[in-house]
Amino acid sequence: MDVVIALDFDGTLYPITDYDSEQLLLHLSGREGAEELIERDKKGGFDPVSFNADFERIIHGLEVFYIDEAARIIHGRCADEDFSPLRRLQAKGCHIAIISCGSDLLISRFLALAGLEAEMIVAKEIVAEDGRISKVKSHINDIREKEEAIRRIRERWPGCSVIAVGDGPTDSYMLRASDYPFVISYNGRRRLEGYEIIDSFSRVEEVADSLLQC
């Protein structure tokens, strides 16, 4: 049986402190309008389509170096052993998919630092040419589209079992479409009614190992 671990990115693979990954990229850019967009995003309730348009406008032409730097900083919030359960599961043949409203280059650079590889990333696509960001293509503009991403996983791996891990309400559609949903809480304050709360990926490893033995 194929086992797919579907993961949100921001707040799930690493704890959010001052900025999430895209906010950090904006902050590092130092560009006009970046801090204003960050503050608007932090207040919540911001239309994703509007955010994505402003995000692309601000980071257009930015050196890819800043993506690497942002990935390095957020990876620094984690301990190497945090990813050990996921690395072991990947070595056993489990598939990893990332379903995020974030950006694919930020995600892939972070995963490389964590020693992980995603076979599927559903997120904003950052296109780079000659070492600079030339375009941003949005593939998730609404959290409900995360449910559609789970359907795509089931099409790619027919008959698979899907373990999903998110960090809150924005992941609810993804979680309810999975077979084994979990909410990860790094600070103990995250709650989402109806879902098991975990503080590490050890519980994910336990469930995946039981499925691999079926």
Image (spheres, rainbow, N blue to C red):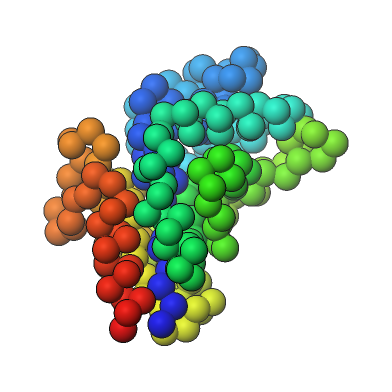
Q: Is residue 177 visible?
A: no
Instruction: Name which residue lies at 48% across and 62% down.
Output: 90
Query: Along the horizontal axis of the image, is 111 left or right of 198?
Result: right
Q: Nearer the viewer, residue 50 or 191?
A: 191
120 and 208: which is toward the camera: 208
Q: Quadrant of residue 47?
A: top left
Res. 145 image quadrant = bottom left
Point 32% across, 79% down: residue: 213
Tag count in the figure? Answer: 0
Quadrant in which the C terminus is drawn: bottom left
Residue 98 percent across, percent down from the top left: 48, 55
The x and y percentages for residue 110 are 55, 40
Residue that appears at 76% across and 41% down: 128
Q: Report the side of 86 relative to 23 (left or right).
A: left
Assign the N terminus to one quadrant of the image.
bottom left
Can residue 127 be seen by looking at this rendering? yes
Q: Residue furthest left?
A: 193
Q: Residue at x 47, y 42 (%)?
A: 48
Q: Nearer the viewer, residue 80 or 38?
A: 80
Residue 32, percent from left and from top: 63, 15
Q: Is residue 118 left or right of residue 83?
A: right
